[in-house]
Image (cartoon, coloured by chain):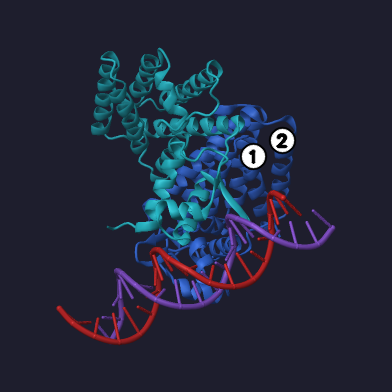
Chain colours: A blue, B cyan, C red, D purple
Amino acid sequence: MATETTVEKLANDLAEAILAGVFPPGSKLDENQLAQRYEVSRTPVREALRQLATTGLIEFRPRRSAIVSTVTPAQLEELFIAMGEIEATCARLAAISMAPTERRRLQMVHERMGQAELQNDPSAFAEDNHLLHAMIYSGAHNAVLKDMAISLRRRLSPFRRAQFHLEGRPPRSFREHDAVVSAITRGDAAAAHAAMLHHVMLIEQSYEDLCATQTLRLPVNETN
Amino acid sequence: MATETTVEKLANDLAEAILAGVFPPGSKLDENQLAQRYEVSRTPVREALRQLATTGLIEFRPRRSAIVSTVTPAQLEELFIAMGEIEATCARLAAISMAPTERRRLQMVHERMGQAELQNDPSAFAEDNHLLHAMIYSGAHNAVLKDMAISLRRRLSPFRRAQFHLEGRPPRSFREHDAVVSAITRGDAAAAHAAMLHHVMLIEQSYEDLCATQTLRLPVNETN
DNA sequence: GATGATTTGTACGTATGTATA
DNA sequence: ATATACATACGTACAAATCAT
């Protein structure tokens, strides 16, 4: 019961719902409706919305409903680029300052991920993928950068999810990780940076390919 | 009158007051007191506080007063490191993607800053220093990274202000800028990154020197 | 373009949890 | 340890502005 119950919970629930596509980009967030839906009053709703607004997930307009942020393709690319740069920075710092234990654990998770790929276990693969990246953020030993990375990753998660279903992406992803993990474990900062930048750029690329092949423009739908 | 009057204004005013040291780190932010002081009700105060909490400037505790964030030396160093990395990333991207006009303007401001240093005009120097860094953020052509850089710079501003008064810092700062600006204008991405990283590290160093020589631990006081 | 309905913005009251005597 | 004081958390009410007809 340590959490700030209502607002904290609401902010998380709302963020999750938005990222899951329950409230699609551009949709209005009526305070009264949200209050009814989550069975609270408008006050905590407003405070949660304001919190989400500072993260960029939604937009507050003066006297009108808050709306879920619409990301243009150009903005999306900027998010991917920023994500790549932050992750690459974390990878570089991780190569410099990870403890031996951290390096071993990183290697371990990476290898387990390779097995998941061979065994064609997408959920284990995705889970370890997440863990691997998180370990690199932590390995940078910088809470500020870590928070930035987590926030960006969260923001981009709807756009990254789709790519796991792309044919041939997991094995390639594993090979890219291999370059990153290898560079980090041997302490090659420049190589770790370059490899991670490359990896995230390819993630963006495969997302764009996905958009091109499918008629989908928005990455999410109600079925999620 | 486009702004969301009360809350938006309050959040800005409060942030400014905190950064100026009116509310020192660790001090409690009583909602009623703030409401009286700024002549509004508690509701906008709460919303402004929550906004500041997401930026890390203050901390919300479940059923207790919000407090101005206390930055430990370790956290401060992480902030400086993150700042250096983000600025260096912006410099690298700027070297790659600045338009010719932007490069010329950057060079121009840099030269003007050199004159301000020669003429011993600290306020002009400080102003151009701010402008120069801002131009590099913009030059990266990535709004996400730019916002991160601005936010970090703002957060660290109380700790950077002091260093301008350090003997011999401005000419050194100018020389460090020279390396950055030169690398950017000639499009040398790696050099721009390295030079900026070096520059910000030296800023942190001079702040630490300042702390060591003076008995001051907190960077700001009421006279500002 | 004006008017009514709906929704946001702010104020305030009550309850609950925290700190203190 | 129990009780008291006090500040926050949430709910509700009213005013002002937007939008829809």
**Vertically, is B168 above or below B203?**
above
Mark 2 Cα shell of 10 Å, populated few (<14), some (14-19), many (≥20) = some
- Residue A209 seen from this side: no
Q: Amino acid at mark 1?
A: Ser
Observer-nearest of A179 and D1: D1
* Residue on which the image places disc 1: A138
- Residue A39 seen from this side: yes
**Vertically, is A114 above or below B43?**
above
Q: Amino acid at mark 2?
A: Glu
* Residue on which the image places disc 2: A102
Quadrant (top left/top right/bottom left/bottom right) for the N terminus of chain B: bottom left
> Residue at the location (65% across, 36% down)?
A139
The answer to which quarter of the image holds residue A192 is top right
> What separation in Å lies between label 2 and label 1 (alpha carbons)?
9 Å
- Pointers 2 and 1 in contact (CB under 8 A)? yes
* Left or right: A12 as drawn, with respect to B142: right
* Picture coordinates of residue B98, whole percent (x, y): 31, 34
Observer-nearest of B120 and B217: B217
* Label 2 or label 1, whichever comes before in sequence order: 2
Mark 1 Cα shell of 10 Å, populated few (<14), some (14-19), many (≥20) = many
* Picture coordinates of residue B77, whole percent (x, y): 56, 29
User: Marks 2 and 1: same chain?
Assistant: yes
Element type at marker 2? helix
Observer-nearest of B144 and B96: B144
Chain holding disc 1: A
> Residue at the location (41% across, 34% down)?
B90
> Residue at the location (58% across, 40% down)?
B26
Chain holding disc 2: A
